[in-house]
Amino acid sequence: MMIYNISDRPPFGKNLLFSLQLVLACFVATCLIAQICGVSAAAALVGAGIGTIFYLIITNFKSPMYISSSGAFVAPVLAALTLGGYTGAAIGGVISCIVYCIFGYIFSKVDIDNIYKIFPKTLIGAITAVIGINLMPFCLTYVQIAGQTSIWGVVIAFITMTAIALISQYAKGLGKILPFLLGTLIGYGVAIILTLTGIYPIVDFSVFQNLKLFAIPDFGFFHFSTISWSAILSIVVLYIVYTVSASMELLSDHAALGAIIGTDLYRNPGLSKIYFGEGAANLINSLFSGLGSCSYGEGISTVGFSKVASTWTTLWAAIIMIVLGFFGPVQALITSIPSCVFCGAALILYGFIACSGIKMLQQVDLNDNKNITIVSVVLSLGISGIAIGGTTFALSGVALALIAGVVLNLILKNKN
């Protein structure tokens, strides 16, 4: 049961803390994707924040999903930047938006009960578990310090994780619903002490040098240029294929969030608005940073663990992200928090998503041969790394597992 539901408006002070907690959960992945693609992290923060606001508006503030830089779009973004620079990436964003809007239009014409026949609880529960499990390997990267695996990174992660667990279990009042914010501060504090005492250099204080109070990010639209028609055609085809794949994860993410908060998001705000909203977020982020966008598992699990599902919290988290893109000192402060601290939160957040899927599967009769077959195949395909395709495009992970699960659900008949 949520402490604050979707339409609830927490007091401003509390909501600010809830929002900061959500920002911390989504910050690392947002900046990591920008770093991988070689674009401005500040621009990515602004693009994600504005994209999330548009998503909230289009969904009538009835879905607390946070939308940010997508790992699923790394390959097409890198290809688009190579073929046509930021203009190519922006064209890709337009194509993604169009594909999402086409799906949105289709779902506006389909009865929701028919959708549930295609995506039953058996399939969504297994996919939700796969999403959480597939996020877990990122923890191996997060515990690195300065690009190197270190026992101190693991120690800080465990200290942060333990602090979050103790606060969540034993804290009273406001502290109980801010475990990730408070746990992160504790882990960061220990990392600072270890650095200042010379025991081990964990915190990089160089980010505070030559700080500017205010700086305009290096937005992608500053670098628009001409592009050949052949490059445009390649980008269009690539983004269509990857967007179709990413749209499958959109379905599972919103089903997972809906199950956690006890609201059927497929019905309200409706899949059509969800697709329109995520399409708009993709377009906006591509214009500002060149990146694609997707719903964030980190945000889903933060909502579930803190039991704060208010869209006002999501809105202020988006606003904070935008401010971070322009305000140097605050951005430097959050950037200085080592990834091993965030790993402590991720150990719980990613596992929480998987557990949400398992909880959903507890409502399914796994003695039924059809159900156990679907769950088994989805888990195997989703986790094994099996892929269909080549170097240009490969269908794997959640998308491949979801498609296989849908096919099995349609061809395997229920026993009377």
Image: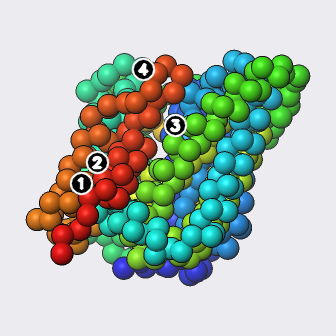
Query: Circle 3 sits on which residue?
Result: 71
Q: Secondary structure at mark 2?
A: helix
Q: Answer yes or no: do the residues labelled 3 and 1 have beta carbons within 8 Å? A: no
Q: CA distance from mark 1 to mark 4?
A: 37 Å
Q: Nearer the viewer, residue 162 or 23?
A: 23
Q: Which residue is mark 1?
A: 375
In three-dimensional space, the C-alpha distance between marks 3 and 2, rounded to whole angstroms, equals 21 Å
- Between 234 and 340, the residue placed more toward the observer is 234
Q: Residue at horizontal 80%, vertical 29%?
A: 87
**Looking at the image, is mark 1 or mark 4 nearer the viewer?**
1
Residue 364 in view: yes
Q: How far apart are labels 2 and 4 at the CA level?
A: 33 Å
Q: Nearer the viewer, residue 354 or 329?
A: 354
Using the rendered image of the protein, determine whether residue 25 is visible from the camera's viewpoint: no
Q: Amino acid at mark 4?
A: Gly
Of the residues tagged 3 and 2, which is closer to the observer?
2
Q: Position of residue 78 (x, y in %)?
A: 62, 24
CA gap, disc 1 to disc 2?
5 Å
Taking the spot 40% from the left edge, 30% from the top edge, the residue there is 388
Give, as a three-letter code, the residue at label 1.
Val
Provide residue 76's location: percent of width, then percent of height. 61, 29
Characterize the local packing of mark 1: few (<14), some (14-19) or many (20 or more) Cα atoms within 10 angstroms.
many
The residue where tag 4 is placed is 147
Q: Is residue 332 left or right of residue 124?
A: right
Q: Dots 1 and 2: beta carbons under 8 Å?
A: yes
Q: Is residue 112 left or right of residue 136?
A: right
Q: Give the secondary structure at mark 3.
A: helix
- Residue 331 lies in what quarter of the image? top right
Residue at (33%, 75%) from the top-left corner?
172
Dot 3 or dot 1: first in sequence order is 3
Answer few, some or many: residues within 10 Å of disc 2's Cα (few below 14, many 20 plus, some between 14 and 19). Answer: many
Q: Which residue is mark 2?
A: 378
